[in-house]
Amino acid sequence: MTTIACTGHVLLDLPIFFGPVAVISAWILMVNRRDRRRTQR
């Protein structure tokens, strides 16, 4: 029963803490791709 109770907390906390990390990582990847395309021209 411990794993079922813990899963609920993880599913609620994961978007709160991982959301900003995912957004910042996606933004950095997008900027890097755009810079690579500009240097290839």
Image: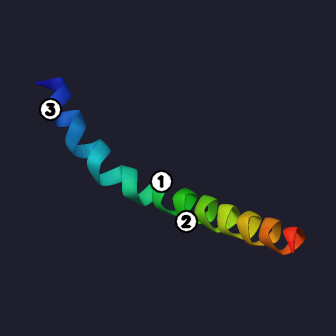
Q: Residue at horizontal 74%, vertical 72%? A: 34
Crowdedness of circle 3 by 10 Å Cα count: few (<14), some, many (20+)? few
Mark 1 — residue?
18
Residue type, label 1: Phe
Mark 3 — residue?
4
Residue 21: quadrant of the picture: bottom right
Image mark count: 3
Percent across and percent down for residue 5 are 17, 35
Q: Callout 2: helix, strand or loop?
A: helix
Q: Is residue 4 left or right of residue 16?
A: left
Residue type, label 2: Val
Distance CA(mark 2)–CA(mark 3): 29 Å
Q: Closest to the observer: 38 or 11?
A: 38
Mark 2 — residue?
23
Q: Closest to the observer: 25 or 10?
A: 25
Percent across and percent down for residue 6 are 24, 34
Which disc is residue 9 wearing?
none
Q: Which badge, 3 or 1, is on the more N-terminal residue?
A: 3
Distance CA(mark 1)–CA(mark 2): 9 Å
Q: Which badge, 1 or 2, is on the more N-terminal residue?
A: 1
Q: Residue at horizontal 70%, vertical 63%? A: 28
